[in-house]
Image (cartoon, rainbow, N blue to C red):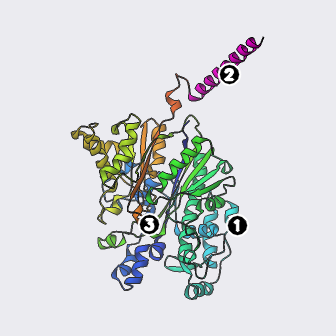
Amino acid sequence: MNSVIKGTSYVLVHTPDLVMQSGTTQTTERIVNPDSEYLKELPGHLRSYEQAVGYLPNQTYIGNMTPEQLGAVPQPWYEAPAQGGREGRFGEIMPEDEFYLLMQACDVFDLMFLEKGFVEAVKPKLERHPLVTQELLGRIRAGVEQAEIGHFVNEEHAEPIVCEGRTVGYIKRAHDVDVNLSAHVMLENIVSKATSVLSLLHLVKNAGVEKESIEYVIDCCEEACGDMNQRGGGNFAKAAAEIAGLSGASGCDVRGFCAGPAHAMITAASLVKAGTYKSVAVTAGGCTAKLGMNGKDHVRKGMPILEDMLGGFSVLITANDGVSPEIDTNVCGRHTVGTGASPQAVITSLVLDPLQKAGLKIPDVDRYAVEMQNPDITKPAGAGDVPLANYKMIGALAVKNGDLDRKDLADFVSGHGMCGWAPTQGHIPSGVPYLGFCCDDILAGRIRRAMIVGKGSLFLGRMTNLFDGVSFLVHENSAAGAESGISEEQVRRLIAQALREFAGTLSGEKAGEEA
C-alpha cells in the first residue's frame, strides 16, 4: 500500500542582523565594495519583527492564510495591512534573539558563545515556548563577558553574532586551517540545524505522534557539513534528530539543490511503502546565504528587505492509516540525463509523461505545486512571477497535447495553480510549501489529487550543465473510495487463504497417490 502524509510543519525565523552579517550578497559587497551606497542604505530597509510577522506571505507559510486568500489580495503584498501573529496552524515565526539561544542549544562542540546579559534577558522568553523542553534549555550555557567576544571576533577569526546592531556573541572556527570548519561555515551549519530542529518539534506536535515512533529522518537542505577529508559527508538529519529528542531515529542527508525536498519525499515514501521503516520524517532548515539575495534590487526600488526570513519545514510519512492522503509512487516524474533543458522538455518529463503512464491527463490533477517563490521578491529583481510562468507552461502543454482547449488556458492557470508565498531560500519553495494545505484540501474533499514538482539547477556545483527535477502525486486515501468494495489488505488475505487451500489440496492428492 502507498505510504501517507501524517503531518507537516512550517517555520520561519526573522533574522535582520543575519541579513547584514551572513547573506552572500552583503558579505560579497563588503569585500569588493566596502564603501558602497547599498551597504549604507540597507539598514534603513530592514523590517521590524512585527512587520515581518504581519506580512501576508509569511502568515500563509505558517498556515494562518490559505493560498487562495493570499491570491485575493492585490500585489505588492508588502503594502497590504499586516495581520496575524507569531503562531500558525503549521508552525511559527520566531524572533532572532530567541533563535540565537536555540542555535546554542544545537551546538554540541562548544563553538557558540553568547554574552552574559543577553542570555539572562532572552532565556526567560524561550522558557515560555511550549515546545522547548527542559533538556533543551539545559543545553544553553551561561553567558560570557563582552571582552571575550571582542577577543575572538577581532583576533581568532570568529564570526560575530549580532542582534539589533549590537554584537552579543560569537561562533569560533572548529579547526585552525580547514576552511570547511571555518567560523562562517559553522554558523551556516548551526543555523540550518536549528531551523530544522524547530520544524521537527512542531511536526511531532502537529502529527500527534510520540517522538520515539519516528524511525528515520532525511534532511534535504542546501548545506553540506564535512571537513577537508570529506567535504559533504553529513549528517544533518541525525544531528537535528538528536536535539529534537527523536531518540529512536536513524537518518541521512539527501541533496539535490532546489529539487532536494522532492527527491527526499519520494525516497521517504518508498522506504515506508517497502516496509523498511514505518515512519520517516523529511526535514530541512534555512540557508543564511540566501538572506538579502535580491537586496540590491529591493533597496533600489525603495522596498523593504523581504528576504529576511530563514525557512524550515518537516513532513512525516508513515504506513497507510486508511485516512491520510497517499503519496502515489507509481506516478513520479523525473528529468533524465537525456531529457534536455528546454522548458517544454522539462515540464513534459515532470508532468505529462508520468500522468500519461497512469492514464491521467493534465487537467485531471486538481492542483500543481511548483516553485512557489513569492512574486513580491522575484518580480522587482527581474525574475518575474515564477509560479505563474510554470502554470502557463503546464497549461500550454495540456493544450498542445489536446487535453485542454486554448480558450480555457486562463481558467486552467487560475483553477489548477496558486500564487507563490514561500521565501527564496533555495530548496524551501520547491513544491513542498503546499503539502500542508494539500492534506487539508484532500481531507476536506475540496480536491482529489495534487502534483508536487521539484526542480533544480545542477550547474551550480560546476560538475554538469544538466537540469534536474522530480515530481510525485498526492491523492485521497484509497480506502475512502473503497468502502463498498474490498481493500487491498482483504485481497491479500483472500489470496493467502486460496494458496493455503490449494496447498492442502495438493497434499491430499499426494497422500492418495502414496496410499
Q: Give coordinates of residue 324: x percent, y percent.
A: 54, 38
Crowding near the residue tagged with mark 3, few <14, some 14–19, many ≥20 C-alpha atoms within 10 Å: few
> Which mark sits nearer the N-terminus, 2 or 1?
1
Determine the main secondary structure of the stretch shown in magenta. Answer: helix
| Picture residue at 44% right of the left edge, 49% below the top | 434
Quadrant placement of the C terminus: top right
461 up-or-down from 414: above or below:
below
> Which mark sits nearer the N-terminus, 1 or 3?
1
Crowding near the residue tagged with mark 2, few <14, some 14–19, many ≥20 C-alpha atoms within 10 Å: few
- Marks 2 and 3 sit apart, C-alpha to C-alpha, by 56 Å
Q: Nearer the viewer, mark 1 or mark 3?
A: 3
Residue 19 visible? The answer is yes
Q: Label 3 belongs to which residue?
A: 461
* Mark 1: secondary structure: loop
From which residue to which does the magenta span run?
A: 487-515
- Marks 2 and 1 sit apart, C-alpha to C-alpha, by 58 Å
| Picture residue at 34% right of the left edge, 61% below the top | 376
Q: Which label sits on residue 500?
A: 2
Q: Nearer the viewer, residue 175 or 207?
A: 175
230 up-or-down from 244: above or below:
below
Q: Label 1 belongs to which residue?
A: 138
Amino acid residing under circle 1 = Gly
Residue 307 visible? The answer is no
